[in-house]
Amino acid sequence: MTQDFVVGFAKQAIELALLLSLPMLGIGLAVGLAVSIIQTATQIQEQTLTFIPKIVSIFLALLFSFPWLMDKMLRFTHTVLTEFPLYIRLDGS
């Protein structure tokens, strides 16, 4: 294993983690912004009011995007496991 391979592999793993978290974070951001606008318009300044809509929306986003998430994770895991002999190859032998 070379240093370039390890850095590339770590980069792929980080990119996948960011890609998988994107739907939930985006939905949470949008719902939080909408609730904040409603709170500002109605002048209700209850801090706990944002938690329930955000939790429910993130759960629904996870529920609907779960097949896509699993497909991405399974492809990455399959690639790692099938190419594992190439990763552990000894240099110079």
Image: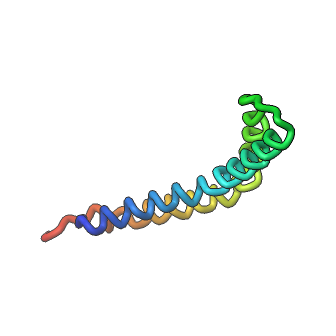
Q: Is 29 drawn above or below residue 42 in the view shown?
A: below
As drawn, is 69 to the left or to the right of 16? Answer: right
Identity of the residue drawn at 72% across and 45% down? 32
As drawn, is 70 to the left or to the right of 56? Answer: left
Rendering coords of residue 17 (x, y %):
52, 55
* Quarter location, residue 51: top right
Task: For the C terminus, give its image quadrant.
Answer: bottom left
Rendering coords of residue 41 (x, y %):
84, 43
Q: Nearer the viewer, residue 31 or 24?
A: 31
Q: Nearer the viewer, residue 42 or 80?
A: 42
As drawn, is 3 to the left or to the right of 73? Answer: left
User: How did the renderer colour the structure?
Assistant: rainbow
Q: Is residue 62 visible?
A: no
Q: Is residue 58 visible?
A: yes
* Quarter location, residue 23: bottom right
Q: Nearer the viewer, residue 45 or 59?
A: 45
Identity of the residue drawn at 63% across and 61% down? 71
Task: For the N terminus, give its image quadrant.
Answer: bottom left
Q: Nearer the viewer, residue 43 or 85?
A: 43
As drawn, is 77 to the left or to the right of 6? Answer: right
Identity of the residue drawn at 32% across and 63% down? 7
* Quarter location, residue 5: bottom left
Rendering coords of residue 84 (x, y %):
37, 62
Q: Looking at the image, how many numbered discs can be counted on the residues? A: 0
Residue found farthest to the right: 42
